[in-house]
Structures are given as structure tokens and as C-alpha cells.
Image: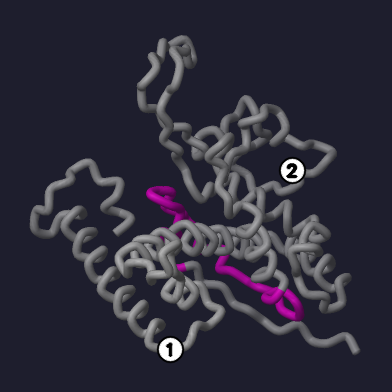
Amino acid sequence: MMAASVTPVRVALPGSRWARGQGARARLHRLLHELVAERRARDEAPDLLSRLSHARDDSDALLPAGEIVDHLSFVLLAAHDTTTATVAMMLAELARRPDWQSRVRAEIEARDGEPVTVASHAALVDIGLVFREAIRLSPPVPFSPREVVVDTTIGGTPVPAGSLVSAASLGLHVHPEWWTDPQVFDPDRFGPARAEDKGHSHLFVPFGGGAHLCIGNHLAEIMAKVVVVRLLAGHRIVGDPGRPVVFTPVPIPRPARPVILDVRAIASRT
């Protein structure tokens, strides 16, 4: 469904990407309609699907099922696919960089089992550096379409008001004038000693910027930290050095092929 959203040929020719995307959307919506009906047949539970299925408008009527299904379709993309892609990138790079994996594990062990919470997650400094480097190299939203509101000039080219442009974080995040060895996985570039992301107010924009900054940016970081902490507490991950991880960047980043990692328990020191 997402692949169809970026295809230039929007005609449902048999076997085309657009036709496959339309079919996938129809199947997804049928499934979600069934789940909404199933949740409404039960008492309300704390999960998002149940909450939305039981939600009511100002007139105390249940929200239309179609509106809930449209919302859930977007949530699957914006709140799930983007985060899982980032976690995949983090784990793949940590498997490839045992020095950083050891550094992250030491930070986890120092917490002595303390859970990751909204209040405590900022203390996970090294995991935060890894998170930011992962979304620099593989931004969750590689292109942000915008409409120009006033006449301006970009790179010497006049751009009149009303024009449609796209801010490409995918290119901006690896621009050699702003980043040191931009293709190299180097989380320390975000540390206070270098702070390469501070070279310009809109140099590092994995979640967009301005009035349209993604409202889930903090939640995404917390979720990623929770996964890494749970996985690396007492374990180490090992990848295949002969099988490099390749990400397809659009419409949202995802591994071009399965990321195969071994998760191995670390023997207790006691």
C-alpha cells in the first residue's frame, strides 16, 4: 500500500504497483473494520484500537467505523513502521559495531534493571546518540513536501509562492559540507564535543520541523530505547559481517532484505 503512494503511474493496470497498492489497502481496511466490530462487541480495554472503537463524538454517538479505520491505517505507518525501521537500523549497526554495543550495554547495566520511562529515558545518553545517528542515516520520513508561502530563492533559483517543494532530509543528513564522513555510522557526532547537528537550525530534521514537527518524536525515541534496553540487558547481538544491511529509503525506510541477527545470552558474572 505504501509503495503505491509514491508510484508516478496512478492507473490500476493489472499487476501494476498502483493496482497492488489498491488491493492491499482494500484488504487492510476489511481487516480493520472486522477488528473495530470485534472490539465494540467487548467491554472497552486500554489498547488504542479498543479506545477508538468505543470513542464517542460531542453528540455521544460512536465514531464512524470508516473514520477509525482511516486513522488506524495512518497509525500503522506513522507510529509503527517508522519506529520498527529505526530499531532495525540501530540493532544492525550495534551488531556491526561491538565497541558501541559494549558502551550501550554498560549504560544499561549501570541502571540495574530500572525501567525506561518518560521521566528516566533521557539518562540513556549513549542509546540516544545511537538513535539519532540511526535516523540521520535512515530518516523515518526521507522527504517532506511543503508549499511555498512567499516568493523566495533557493540555491539561486527563484521559487514563487504556491510552488510545491520537497525538503529531502535523506540528502541533507549526509551533506558533506555539514557532516564529517557522512556515510559513516558515528553516534559521537551528536555528542556535546562535536554537536554536528547544531550547525544549522534545520540541518537535522528526521521528524520535520516548524509547525509540522512530528508529534510522535519523543515517543519514538522512548520506544526505541525500551526495545534496545530489553534486548541488550544480558544479551549481545551478532550480525553476519559478509551480509551488509541495505535499507530502501522510500516511501519510508525498510530493510531491502531480512536483517538476520543472532541474540546470544551473556553468562552471568556471579
* Quarter of the picture holding the C terminus: bottom right
The magenta stretch is 230-258
Q: Which residue corresponds to the image point at 28% horizontal and 69% vertical from the top-left?
A: 29
- Separation of residues labelled 1 and 2 (CA atoms): 47 Å
Give, as a three-letter code, the residue at label 2.
Phe
- Give the residue number, with chain letter if any, for mark 1: 42
Q: Position of residue 2 (x, y in %)?
A: 33, 56
- Residue 117 in the image: state x and y as whole percent: 75, 68
Residue at screen point 19% across, 64% down: 23
* Disc sitting over residue 181 in the figure: none
Residue 11 % position (x, y)? 13, 48
Whether residue 32 is in magenta: the answer is no
Mark 1 vs mark 2: in front: 1
Q: Is residue 105 above or below residue 79?
A: below
Q: Amino acid at mark 1?
A: Arg
Which residue lies most toward the front here? 59
Q: Residue at x 87, y 77 (%)?
A: 112
Position of the N terminus by quadrant: bottom left
Q: Which residue is mark 2?
A: 190
Q: Point out the residue furthest to the right here.
A: 270
